[in-house]
Amino acid sequence: MQIISISNLPIHQIQYLTAAAGGVGAIARSLPILLAEVDYLPNNLEAIIVTSDLQGVDPKNQQLLSYLAIEELEKLAEIGKIPSLKNTGMILAGDLYAEVNRRGGVVGDVREIWLAFNRRFRWVAGVAGNHDSLGNTPLQVQSFQQHRNIYYLDGEIKSNGELSLAGISGIIGKKGKPFRRPEKEFLKIIRLLLKQSPDILILHEGPNDPQGNLVGQESIRRELEKINLTNDLLVICGHSYWKVPMIVLENGIQVIKVDGRAIVIQAKK
C-alpha cells in the first residue's frame, strides 16, 4: 500500500480551542482534513482516516475535539465528500486528551473516545500517546483491548483481514511516567515488528527529517532506514507538528505526520 498523492488544500477545517503556550488562556485553531490517494486498499475498504494529537475542545460545548471530529466526519460522509464511515478504517496515533487551560503534564482516559470512533467506523486501530490513559490497571487495559474491531497496539502486530498493523505506544523517555520507554527498548521493538513485514507501522513519536528541518527522533529515523523493504511500508506518527504531511525516507519508507491534521486515504480510481 503506497501513497500516491496528498492534497495541499483541505476539504474542510474543524475549528477548536486549545491551551495557549505557557498555559495562560486558550487560542483558536483549526484541524484541516486532507485527501490522499493510495494505490490499493485491502478488505474492500473505501477509505482509511488517520489522525492524532486532537488536543483541544469544541468552542460551543467544551467537549473534547475528538468527539467534534467524529461529528464533522459524519457530516462530510453524509454529503458525499468522504466515503461512508461504516466502510472506513480509523487510525489514531495518540494524544486524544486535552485540557483547554493547561498544557504539559496532562493525562486523561481516552477509552470512551476510542469506543465512540468504533461505533461509527468499521474498525479503529492505533496507539496511545504520552497524554493518554487506557485504564488504571493492566486488567482494565486488557478488557479494553477485547472490544470487537478495536486494535490497540503497544509493541504488537495484529492482522485485520489482508491488512497487517503494527504499533508502539508512547515516546522515548525514562521509565516512571506513562508510556515512556528507554531508547534502546523502543528501537528494539521497532526491529522486531518490522521483521514481520507489517503494511502499516503506527507510532506516536516518529522520526525526524534534518533536510526538511522537521522535528522528531533521529534514532527512530536511523532505525527505519536500516530496513531492507520486502513490501511497501507506511509509517503513521504524531506527537510533533510538521509543515508537510508526508516525507519519504532514503529506503523508500513513507512517513505520514498527522499531528494536528486528519487525512482521508482512498484508493486511486
Image (cartoon, helix red, strand yellow):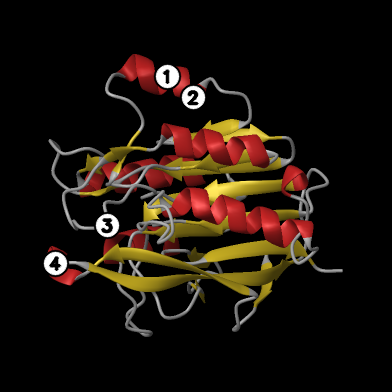
Q: Name the residue tied to disc 1.
A: 142
Mark 4, secondary structure of its residue: loop
Is 49 on the left or on the right of 20, as rendered?
Answer: right
Does residue 230 appear anywhere in the picture? no
Q: Name the residue tied to disc 2.
A: 145
Q: Which is nearer the N-term, disc 4 or disc 1?
A: 4
Q: Position of residue 231 (x, y in %)?
A: 65, 55
Dot 1 alpha-carbon crowd within 10 angstroms: few under 14, some 14 to 19, many 20 or more: few
Question: Identity of the amino acid at label 1?
Answer: Gln
Residues at circles 1 and 2 in contact by the CB criterion of under 8 Å: yes
Q: CA distance from mark 1 to mark 2?
A: 5 Å
Q: Name the residue tied to disc 3.
A: 100
Residue ID at (64%, 79%)? 7
Q: Name the residue tied to disc 4.
A: 24
Q: Nearer the viewer, mark 4 or mark 1?
A: 4
Is 44 on the left or on the right of 220, as rendered?
Answer: right
Mark 2, secondary structure of its residue: helix
Q: Which is nearer the N-term, disc 3 or disc 1?
A: 3
Q: Nearer the viewer, mark 2 or mark 4?
A: 4
Q: Nearer the viewer, mark 3 or mark 1?
A: 3
Dot 3 alpha-carbon crowd within 10 angstroms: few under 14, some 14 to 19, many 20 or more: many
Q: CA distance from mark 3 to mark 4?
A: 10 Å
